[in-house]
Image (cartoon, rainbow, N blue to C red):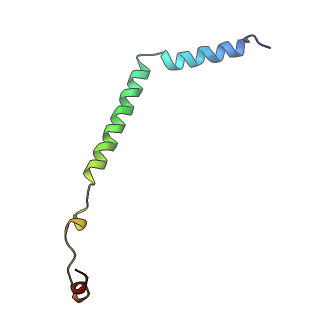
Amino acid sequence: MGALSIWHILAIVIAAALLFGGRGKISSLMGDTAKGIRAFRDGLKGEDAPEQAKTPLPKDEKDVGRT
């Protein structure tokens, strides 16, 4: 009950092969993640304030007493 069976060992080997196998899969995955974060930040910077919010609203008769 406390020993590792063949299925446990096989699961560990498959997980290690997925994580560490191939030509630097983890480093390429982290590079892709960094590119995604950078693109998200650039997208946030581009939408600081829309054009309509920068222009002042026209005043009418109701606004004269509110100043």
Image coordinates for residue 49, horizontal then vertical, percent: 25, 59
Query: In the displayed image of the protein, which residue is found farthest to the bottom?
Result: 61
Tell me the quarter of the image containing the N terminus: top right
Query: In the displayed image of the protein, which residue is found farthest to the right?
Result: 1
Residue 54 sits in quarter: bottom left
Residue 13 sits in quarter: top right
Tell me the quarter of the image containing the C terminus: bottom left
Residue 17 sits in quarter: top right
Image coordinates for residue 5, horizontal then vertical, percent: 74, 12
Identify which residue is drawn at 71% across, 16% down.
7
Image coordinates for residue 62, horizontal then vertical, percent: 26, 87
Name the residue nearer the viewer: 4 or 48. 48
- Quick check: 8 left or right of 30? right
Where 58 falls versus 35 (above or below)?
A: below
Image coordinates for residue 46, horizontal then vertical, percent: 25, 51
- Quick check: 18 left or right of 57? right
Identify which residue is drawn at 31% across, 41% down.
39
Identify which residue is drawn at 24% across, 84% down.
63
Identify which residue is drawn at 59% across, 17% down.
14
Where 28 falls versus 45 (above or below)?
A: above
